[in-house]
Amino acid sequence: MEIFYAIVLLVVATIAANLVYPLFPAIPQAFYQIFAGAILSIVPYFHHFGLEPEVFMLIIIAPLMFYDGQNTDTHSLRRHIPSVVSMAITLAILTVILLGYLSHSVLPALPLALAFALAAIVTPTDAVAVSSITRNLTVPEKVMGMLERESLFNDASGLVAFNLALAAFSTGKFSVRFGITHFLVVFLGGLLIGLILGGILTWGRVTMVQNGMDSVSIIVPYDILTPFFIYLVAEHFELSGILAVVAAGLLRSTAATQIRLSSTQMQLVTRSTWQIMTSLLNGFVFVLLGVSLPTVWQNIMADHTKSLPLYILLAVILYVVMFLLRYL
């Protein structure tokens, strides 16, 4: 029952934030959701709240990235592949390396491997945050399109770099050759398994529609379960589950013509279901961030080394350097 109540509270907090947002739209909606999460942390169940990263990636991020993938203009994506690779891979890796050494120089007590882990955490632009923060801003269409295309892939870059940094910290060993090889295997393997499974599941969906098995009770659950299944299979083989669901979503986008063969009612129900679900999950991302902020603050205050000013200085330096890197 506790899990049920927790989910209900998350939904209520998200709805409350969304109700307040139209009253003061100058402030991005994400900030209202973070504030709602901070208030929610007062509830006993959310005291010292800690969300398992695996659960967060599976339950929230996987369906969101799949939805973003299937709503991406694949023709535009193909035209901008060199730019996407440059931003999502090359820039991400260079940023991790630079920020890692910079963090270690500012905080010498922080092991270099953990400095790289910190850099990997803050490097990727987030697809959810990009769309939420810029909702009421006038952003050039070319720039916005580039950010959205990049954010489909750079999560994987950050996650792989993060896992490599943690492995180096725990084992005390790091091989550049192994790191690059592992990165390519996880990255490309995730794309490949996503395309294979996405192709099979899309073919299954089209086949059901063509054979008249396109009732709401079949197609909607089938669509919703697709990203979870693909993510779990990819992670089982130690490949990038995020890239797998993105690749499957992009493949689904290319098959849009065949998918539209279903009835108009089915298309409307499916589209509405995805919009409602992703809207709630988008809110959960920031509400959960707000819920965990008090715990993070308590952990910082429990640090008796009096290094909080140094943490703040490091945060400002990382922000400025990342801003300059992306500007250049």
Image (tube, helix red, strand yellow):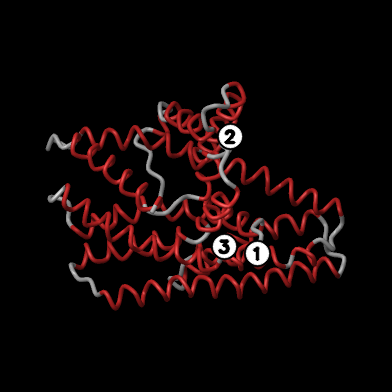
Decide which of tag 2 and tag 3 comes sooner along the chain: 2
Foreground mark, 1 or 3? 1
**Up-down: is 263 above or below 209?**
above
Residue picked out by circle 3? 246
Q: What mark, if any, has residue 74 been given in the picture? A: 1
Numbered marks: total: 3
Name the residue at 42% across, 65% down. Answer: 89
Q: What mark, if any, has residue 136 been given in the picture? A: 2
In the picture as drawn, the residue positioned furthest to the front comes out as 328
The image quarter containing residue 157 is bottom left
**Up-down: is 28 above or below 280?**
above
Amino acid type assigned to the residue bearing label 3 in the image = Val
Name the residue at 67% across, 74% down. Answer: 200
Circles 2 and 3, Cβ within 8 Å, touching? The answer is no
Question: Is the residue marked by circle 1 packed among few (<14), some (14-19), or many (20+) residues within 10 Å?
Answer: some
Gap between marks 2 and 3, in whole Å? 26 Å
Dividing the image into 4 quarters, which one contains the C terminus? bottom left
Gap between marks 1 and 3, in whole Å? 12 Å
- SS assignment at label 3: helix
Left or right of 322, for residue 201? right
Amino acid type assigned to the residue bearing label 2 in the image = Asn
Image location (x, y in percent) of residue 155? 45, 58
Name the residue at 48% across, 28% down. Answer: 36
Q: Nearer the viewer, residue 49 or 282?
A: 282
Left or right of 201, for residue 3? left
Q: Nearer the viewer, residue 13 or 314?
A: 314
- SS assignment at label 2: loop
Amino acid type assigned to the residue bearing label 1 in the image = Thr
Name the residue at 51% across, 39% down. Answer: 133
